[in-house]
Amino acid sequence: MTAPGRIRAGIGGWTYEPWRGTFYPPKLAKARELEYAASRLTAIEVNGTFYSAQTPATYARWRKAAPDGFVYALKAGRFCTQRKDLSQAGESIAKFLGQGIVELGEKLGPILWQLPATKKFDVEQIKAFLALLPPAQDGLPLRHAIEPRHESFDDPAFFALARAAGLAVVFADSPKYPCFGEQTGPFTYARLQHAREEVATGYDAQALDRWARKAGDWAQGGREVFVFFINGAKLRAPAAAEAFLKRLG
């Protein structure tokens, strides 16, 4: 019998002033925020890579700041995904993947390809786009997750394409966008977005227990699982992630 896969959990980014005093110690140097967050969580989804390219030195610094076993999920650059015709994204994808992400080494987690809410499912365009996502960069294996945000992607043809390409379709528990529960890749990528500020841990105990059980179900058969507490009441995201991790033992 295959043992369950590892479940990692974390937050989106690590720079957020309201976290000072609620997550970060008040006197912690800003330069040590990433190191602190990485010591308390097991993954971080990096949003800054969506807006601008980073340098190899930056990725190397991120790698050194995190302990063994920690991973960074990177949101792919907007020039890759925010375009009318995704099949023409090849040059932008190559630039994003070639900017130095390999410096993360074993701490590179999945790459998140988040599509705009206006992007509708077009079978030929999506097929061409997925074909542009390579299995490796400079010898480093890559894992890809795609997050469509339009209901037209609730289509067996889309899930078949993702499954054939080995991509995970993001499970987005969002008040704004559709949620796709199909497990199409060798790992699960979940983005939980219903935290409430009036709850100290973002989610109440019952909800956290429910998500922990859900993650355990996803992990059966050796599937690796990534759970990110994103948006909602952002103030509570670190507490939600820590409370979730405690439930995993």
Image (tube, rainbow, N blue to C red):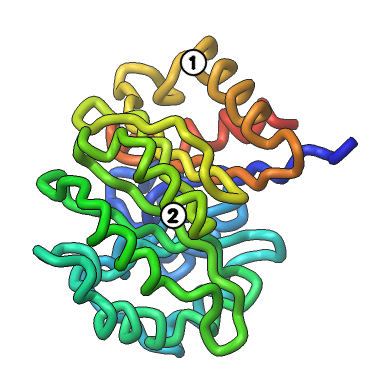
Mark 2 lies on residue: 145
Q: Residue at x 61, y 46 (%)?
A: 8
Q: Residue at x 90, y 36 (%)?
A: 1
Comparing 101 with 185, the one in front is: 185
Horizontal relation, residue 243 to residue 235: left or right: right
Disc marking residue 76: none
Number of residues whose C-alpha sits closer than 10 Å to that of mark 2, classed few (under 14), some (14–19) or many (20 or more): many
Q: Amino acid at mark 2?
A: Ala
Identify which residue, 137 or 202, lies in the foreground.
137
Query: Is the C terminus in the top left, top right, bottom left or bottom right quadrant?
Result: top right
Q: Secondary structure at mark 2?
A: strand
Residue 18 or residue 12, whichever sits in front? 12
Reading the image, the residue beneath label 1 is: 207
Extreme residue in the top direction: 206
Please tell me which residue is depicted at 40% across the width and 25% down the height of the picture. Answer: 202
Residue 139 % position (x, y): 61, 86
Q: Nearer the viewer, mark 2 or mark 1?
A: 2
Q: Quadrant of residue 141?
A: bottom right
Query: Vertical placement of 231 versus 135: above or below?
Result: above
The residues bearing labels 2 and 1 have C-alpha atoms spaced at a distance of: 25 Å
Q: Could you say where residue 159 lies in the image, as x and y percent from the top left?
A: 42, 43
Q: Amino acid at mark 1?
A: Ala
Q: Is residue 198 visible?
A: yes
